[in-house]
Image: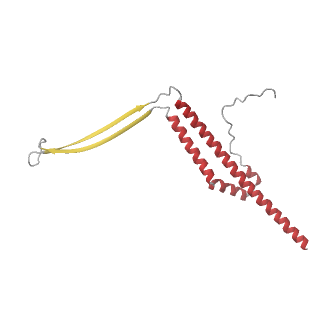
């Protein structure tokens, strides 16, 4: 065309993975293979762990925009004895026991004047979405590989059955 329509969509389109197309074949063995493949495949597990990591990093980048709080506490007990403390002990010296409680807190908040933290948050969100898309791709590739191998097996079994029937007919 003489002019192209500009693409105005800002977010990538994510297609949902809720379509279970393999169930339309109504083959129990195929369904079992796909379930086992998705549960036991290391690449799927790694992709899922990368999603969790990217989500944690996105949450961390989001938290950096908020104020931070730090609270600490301590407790100490001591006993001091000597001549300067009156008491019942021989030599005129007694003992004094004391406890010290300490609670401290602090607050910090980094102002994002130049947008560095906001850009970091946007980058982490984009990385999270990319990991989700990669996970979907990994699952779709795995499912298609399992299904292709299964259909190749069934096709070979059918061809073998036909060849065995041909041998029987020719023998007869």
Please identify the quarter of the rendering in which residue 97 is found: top left
Give the residue drawn at x 50%, y 35%: 63
6 with respect to 64 (left or right): right
* Residue 150 sits above or below residue 167 on the image: above
Q: Is residue 87 left or right of residue 15?
A: left
Which one is nearer the viewer's eye here, 42 or 165? 42
Query: Residue 25: x percent and y percent?
Result: 77, 54
**Residue 55 sits in quarter:** top right
- On-image quarter of the C terminus: bottom right
Q: Residue furthest front?
A: 2
Quadrant holding the N terminus: top right
At horizontal 41% and vertical 32% (from top left) the residue drawn is: 107
Please name the colour scheme applied to the rendered image. secondary structure
Give the residue drawn at x 62%, y 39%. 129
Q: Residue furthest bottom?
A: 172
Image location of residue 85, percent across then percent down: 13, 42
* Front residue of this view, candidates 44 and 91: 44
Numbered-mark total: 0
Q: Residue at x 59, y 50 (%)?
A: 46
Above/below status of 82 relative to 122: below
On the image, the x and y values in percent for residue 52 come to: 56, 45
Question: x, y percentage for residue 57?
Answer: 53, 40
């Amino acid at each position: 065309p003489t002019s192209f329509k500009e693409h105005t969509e800002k977010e990538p389109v994510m297609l949902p993975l809720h379509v279970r197309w393999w169930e339309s074949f109504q083959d129990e063995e195929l369904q079992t293979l796909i379930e086992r493949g998705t549960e036991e495949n290391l690449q799927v597990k790694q992709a899922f762990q990368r999603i969790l990591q990217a989500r944690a990093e996105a949450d961390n980048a989001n938290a950096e925009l908020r104020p931070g709080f730090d609270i600490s506490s301590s407790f100490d007990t001591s006993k001091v004895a000597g001549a300067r403390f009156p008491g019942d002990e021989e030599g005129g010296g007694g003992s004094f026991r004391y406890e010290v409680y300490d609670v401290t807190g602090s607050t910090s908040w980094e102002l994002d004047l130049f947008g560095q933290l906001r850009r970091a948050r946007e980058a982490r969100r984009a990385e999270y979405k990319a990991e989700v898309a990669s996970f979907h791709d990994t699952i779709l590739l795995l499912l298609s590989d399992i299904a292709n191998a299964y259909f190749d097996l069934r096709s070979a079994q059918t061809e073998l059955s036909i060849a065995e029937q041909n041998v029987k007919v020719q023998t007869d």
